Image (cartoon, rainbow, N blue to C red):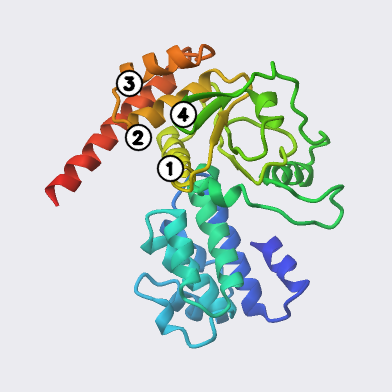
Amino acid sequence: MSAARQISALTHGDPSTGEGCAIFHELVRVALDGNDPLAVIETTLELVAPEHRARWATVLNVSWTPEQATEANGAVWPTLGSAVWALRASTSFEEAMRRVIDLGGDTDTVAAVTGGLVGAVVGITGIPMRWTSAVHGTLPGFPSPVTHLGDLHWLAARLDGSTEGLYEATPSDHLEPQEVVDGVWATDLDGARHSDRDFAVISLCRTGSRFGHDVQRFAYLTDDESNHDLTQVLDDVLADIAALRADDRRVLVHCFGGASRTGLVLRAWLMRDRGMTLQAATAYVGQRWPRLGLWNDSFTESLTALASADQSDAAQRSET
């Protein structure tokens, strides 16, 4: 919190802003440690300068809403107050962001603070990949334009003391893309990199640089047991494929070798889009994509959980 006050003072002389940054940093720290930032607001306020504590207690109170703001929402109090309000009132990153953007006013400021706080709570897999895949721009001192989130990961590692260079993918077999189910194709890393540019690419592994396709999405999957909330990641990928197919786009799914992660998504797509059982989807993909890899038990478990969740959703819809 002390560091946050010092950083804030570089651009903002009002101590109220420093206290707001200090509170924000403490809430993010708690979230990154895997705990609930909303549960520590009261104890965090005890660390705020006494002359500012009451005003911050007002906007961070559970009963406060943005309609009660006494300043324009780009001011420090309603900005952080709105972020905390959105975190309390939302069940997802997307919902929280929509809530604060729909407030109008100084949306870039309020959304930036909300994104930082809620993003720390949900993690990278909780942010829709159609949003994270669109990150681009330039940063001072960066050797090339920032073209995707991997660049920001590398920059964050550098700021934390890493001396490693930008990630460069090793060559894969360069498989020819193959249509597995209507409009959904499969390949490996280099097969995707050099594929027709009219494909909408779903990348399930680190790629290094972008491929040059107009549409390339990046999902965060590793071929081991360490994935966080794998069912949520699958749900995000499947929703993206559905939206792209609704636009009549050819979708090309790949991981490094085109085997395990690619097979996971292909099977999940058949289960959701065609209503297939896990066993039927596995047999279908295996017949049309010989590279299918079945060694990852956590992927099988996630597909079972996905089927159960889809059945539950269908039952609820039929009841209503």
Q: Residue at x 35, y 34 (%)?
A: 273
Residue under numbered circle 2: 273
Q: Quadrant of residue 28?
A: bottom right
Choose the circle earlier in sequence order: 2 or 3.
2
Residue under numbered circle 1: 242
The answer to whether mark 2 and mark 4 are in CB contact below 8 A is no
Q: Residues within 10 Å of mark 3 (few under 14, many from 20)?
A: some
Residue 2 located left or right of residue 74: right
The answer for how far apart the CA atoms under marks 2 and 1 are is 8 Å
Q: Closer to us: mark 2 or mark 3?
A: 2
The answer for how far apart the CA atoms under marks 4 and 1 are is 12 Å
Residue type beneath disc 2 = Asp
Q: Quadrant of residue 207?
A: top right
Q: At numbered mark 1, what does the secondary structure look like: helix, strand or loop? A: helix
Question: How far from the left and from the top, in percent, is residue 239?
Answer: 43, 43
**Dividing the image into 4 quarters, which one contains the N terminus?**
bottom right
Q: Closer to us: mark 4 or mark 1?
A: 1
The answer for how far apart the CA atoms under marks 1 and 3 are is 19 Å
The answer to whether mark 2 and mark 1 are in CB contact below 8 A is yes
Question: How far from the left and from the top, in percent, is residue 29?
Answer: 57, 52
Q: Quadrant of residue 208?
A: top right
- Decide which of 194, 38 is in the foreground and name it: 194
The answer to whether mark 4 and mark 1 are in CB contact below 8 A is no
Disc number placed over residue 265 in the picture, else none: 4
Q: Residue at x 62, y 79 (%)?
A: 16
Residue under numbered circle 3: 278
- Decide which of 106, 133 is in the foreground and name it: 133
Q: At numbered mark 2, what does the secondary structure look like: helix, strand or loop? A: helix
